[in-house]
Amino acid sequence: MNIKRNVLLNPGPATTTDTVKLAQVVPDICPREREFAGLMKNLRRDLVRIVHGDERYTSVLFCGSGTMNIDVCLNSLLPAGKRILVANNGAYSARAVEICEAYGMPHVNLKQPIEAPIDVAAVEAALAADPDIAVVYTTHHETGSGVLNPIREIGASAHAHGCTFVVDTTSTYAMRPIDIIDDNVDFLMASAQKGLQSMTGLSFVVGREDKIRESASFPKRSYYCNLFLQYDYFEKTGEMHFTPPVQTIYATIQALKEYFAEGEAGKWARHTRVFEALHKGLAELGFRNLIKREYQSGLVVSVCYPDDPNWSFEKVHDYCYERGFTIYPGKVGSAKTFRLCALGQIDAPDIVEFFKVLKSALEEYKIEVRYA
Ligand SMILES: *Cc1c(COP(=O)(O)O)cnc(C)c1O
């Protein structure tokens, strides 16, 4: 089978290998068979292994996109009468705030500037001022801007105040090395189509098993999206409570094999090569970054629109798309940006090819890369 290879420079789903794509083509199977339950047991163990969790940690699978994990963690881990603190410097933490609002859960929206990492002192001050906060939540890498947050320090502060620390690691997991223990994280999350380079439809939470058990007595704000209920069903039966994304699970098992074969350090080195190549190509064409280089995650570049009136993101996007490269709009407040991302099974030579295409798009539409 010959499958056209596209280079996705959007923030996930990412470019996958043909072996991962083809792993989905399997004989029909009822996911209630023992054979399938066995696959999920190993998968759950491997998801903990990626972030170096020990026997105190487990993973819980859900059938949905990454936002489902945010919903699950927030609605499941808040004890009665307590509050959530959201350390919020971007679109994904803002989504967590919206989820708190939707459930009517008491929360503090600690809003921080969008172009810089979270100020740990501000988190510490908010915790010191409010003893009713039980859960601290933030986003490791704000994918909308490309800013990386200091989770180890925020986690230390959360733990010093007896809080559970929940981090959205959807756009770093299986890319930037994470150590769930050293990074002071109680719960983190991701979905299969980002760092793992698998398909959409499978999301998962990795976290402290004792805290999941403890949450059994917390208010149940959702039936389908409750962490303890999903965990408990798995423990009792080895299965997901409701129909799993069968083909995505096969693809993810193959993706995990490929992850461990490349290795944590090797994979991060490859993403770093791609990121450096993106910066090099952008600098050569004269594009500017919105976010200071030292604040960047190493995975996403937010590129400022040039001031030439001929600039049209849509036209440039379509030109590149027709040639196998996908670029993506920005998500940083009102700033006019687009994003180039280093996710997926791509390497520096793909980026060299991309910049040839981008350069010819600029020529085609007579766009001059200049800033007022
Ligand atoms: C992609 C992403 C999500 C999940 O988005 P979905 O569209 O629901 O898959 C959540 N958080 C972050 C930081 C992300 O990058």
Image: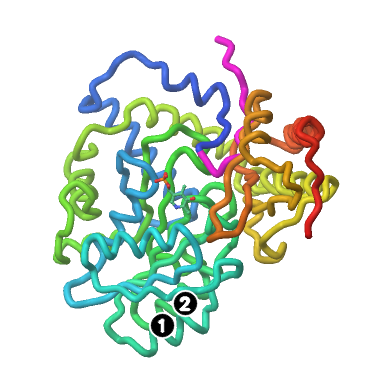
- Residue 93 lies in magenta, yes or no? no
Question: At 60% across and 47% down in the image, what residue appears?
Answer: 264
Q: Name which quarter of the figure residue 78 lies in.
A: bottom left
* Rendered residue at 65%/65% (across/down): 295
On residue 160, the disc is 1
- Residue at the spot 51% in from the left edge and 61% down from the top edge: 140
The amino acid type of the residue labelled 2 equals: Ala
Q: Secondary structure at mark 2?
A: helix
10 Å neighbourhood of mark 1: few (<14), some, or many (≥20)? few
Specify the farthest residue to the front. Answer: 309
The amino acid type of the residue labelled 1 equals Ala
Badge 2 vs badge 1, beta-carbon distance below 8 Å: yes
Q: Where 350 falls versus 370 (above or below)? A: above
Q: Position of residue 271 (x, y in %)?
A: 67, 45
Residue 37 % position (x, y): 27, 32
Quarter of the rendering containing residue 344: top right
Q: Position of residue 69 (x, y in %)?
A: 34, 51
In the picture, the disc for residue 156 is 2
Q: Residue at x 48, y 33 (%)?
A: 198
Quadrant (top left, top right, bottom left, bottom right) of the N terminus: top right
**Residues in magenta, as a range:** 1-12
Name above or below for residue 115 compared with residue 289.
below
Viewer-nearest residue: 127 or 32: 127
